[in-house]
Image (tube, grey):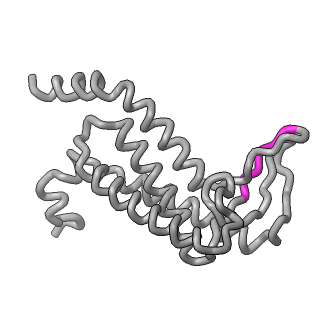
Amino acid sequence: MRLFEGALFKTGLFKETGWRWWWLVLLVLVADQLSKVWVIQNFSLGESVSLLPVFNFTYARNYGAAFSFLGDAGGWQRWLFTVIAVVVSIVLAVWLSRLPKAQLKLSLALSLIISGAIGNLIDRSLYGYVVDFLHVFYQNWHYPIFNIADCAISIGAVLLIWDSFTNDSETQKATSGDKQ
């Protein structure tokens, strides 16, 4: 008996569609959550440890969205951002699962965005805020503190935009080779 003999594998869906990208979603999600648990267990709120002259680990809580948007809105925003994250994650997961094998950039982009959205959704659901700790700065300039999930979402968004400009030609090349 083989380990993976489910319908997903028998039909070839796993090898030929976006289902094969779920390992990346899981990997980024685990890295994000483990890093946040480590920060919560080892740092006091606001505590900062210098790693490089321009980079610290600084424990912060973000009650809002990106750049603390609506962070001081009184608590209702937690549920708004939770619902948005759930809906976006479901839509992107369905999209990813239906993508053909040739759509590499788009699959990578969606995988990263899904993992980041779920990572921050878990924080918001468990704690009521998102755990942030990556702090980039130079002299008096400070970028908003962020986390691995935020990195995944940002990189995924850049790839999504890039794919929107290059997708047609790459998909045609990849699929035309399959037809010959």
Q: Tell me if residue 17 comes above or below residue 57 in the rendering.
A: above
Front-most of 70 and 143?
70
Q: Which residue is painted at 28% across and 48% down in the image?
A: 18
- Answer with left or right where residue 172 lies relative to residue 125: left
Q: Is residue 135 magenta?
A: yes
Helix, strand or loop for the magenta stretch, by majority: strand
Residue 83 image offset from top left, x and y in percent: 45, 68
Q: Tell me if residue 97 comes above or below residue 30 in the rendering.
A: above
Q: Is residue 166 magenta?
A: no
Residue 126 image offset from top left, x and y in percent: 57, 77
Residue 104 image offset from top left, x and y in percent: 34, 37
Question: What span is in magenta?
Answer: 133-138
Q: Which residue is painted at 59% across and 48% down in the image?
A: 151
Front-most of 73 and 86?
73
Q: In the image as oriented, which residue stretches furthest toward the right? A: 139
Q: In the image as oriented, which residue stretches furthest toward the bottom? A: 126
Q: Quarter holding the C terminus?
A: top left
